[in-house]
Amino acid sequence: MTSNGENNQTAPASAEKPFKMAPRGRRQPFKPFATHLIAALAEFVGTFMFLFMSFAGQLMAVGQATSFVGQDRTSSSETVLIIALAYGLSLLVSVWAFYRISGGLFNPVVTLAFALCGKIHGHRALMLFPAQLVASMVAGGLASGLFPPPISWANTTLAPGVSIVRGLFIEMFLTSAFVFVILMLAGEKSKDTFIAPIGIGLTLFAAEIAGVYYTGGSLNPARSLGPAVASRSFPGYHWIYWLGPLLGALLASAFYYLVKFLRYEDVNPGQDSNREDSEV
């Protein structure tokens, strides 16, 4: 006979029960205020990233155009194209990175449109507004401190011959097109929502090509506020970069409500269906 101690020594290791961690309790969801706070933090970082890269690209484009020819060529087609690319691509990657957290709005008037159309809660919108505006000032200040060209080169100003009224309506209609695209691509959920950032970035690119020369192509009060604060330069018509985008967002929201009321899904059905779904 063998002792109990010998039995323990000769028992195979496989007979031992594997170690298991104690089960953890179910993670409790954040309370609404906490989720709004997290969204505001994401909007701050995302807006900063979008505008900082955009301002840097614009300063480079204007600086290169001026230094190569020895005179101001900020209105050249090449410079406008580079500026439009800087803003469009920066928005594309920033939205793609943050849309899962906060929606990737980065614009007070887009936030307002989403609140009016029921895409986000009004309480969240009230927390996103200051986050976006503060982020724009931080982006403008950091771009001013890091890059040699004056940050005033990124200011939104009217071109010679463009009246304040014209500038106001240019900003209004460009913003309305931009906001409506966002509402349809990101606000209306479909199987293609995950690639909405591409369409949003391309829309801003097109709008910038149309508007950069004439008004600076703001479409976003935060975009105009940052460089203006950093350069301490507010033209007397700075208000058009708030009122124009605001009116554009209201117009886009009204048209969005109209197409929803008219049940646009029934006009051209099956556009968001897979091929297999349409054959059923």
Image: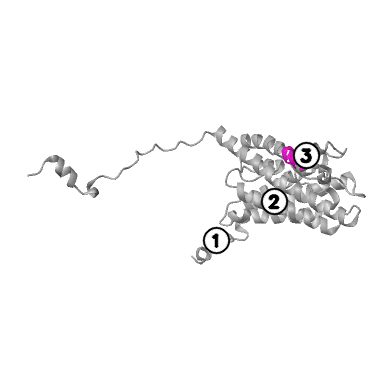
On whether residue 137 falls in the magenta region, the answer is yes
- Please provide percent x and percent y for residue 233: 85, 37
| Residue at image point 57% right, 32% down | 33
Q: Foreground residue, 109 or 145?
A: 145
Q: In the rendered image, which residue does mark 3 sit on?
A: 225
- Above or below — where is 152 with respect to 72? above
Q: Is residue 138 shown left or right of residue 159?
A: left
Residue that carries the numbered disc 1 in the rendered image? 273
Q: CA distance from mark 1 to mark 2?
A: 30 Å
Q: Nearer the viewer, mark 2 or mark 3?
A: 2
Residue in view at x 22 percent, y 47 percent: 15
Please, what secondary structure does the residue beneath circle 2 have? helix
Q: CA distance from mark 2 to mark 3?
A: 18 Å
Visible residue check, residue 262: no
Q: Nearer the viewer, mark 1 or mark 2?
A: 2
Quadrant (top left, top right, bottom left, bottom right) of the N terminus: top left
Q: Are marks 2 and 3 in contact (CB under 8 Å)?
A: no
* Residue type marked 2: Ser
Residue 17: percent from the left, percent from the top? 26, 44
Above or below, 93 against 226 in this view is: below
Viewer-proximal residue among 201 and 247: 201
Q: Provide the residue designation for mark 2.
A: 90
Task: Specify which label sits upstream in the sequence, 2 or 3.
Answer: 2
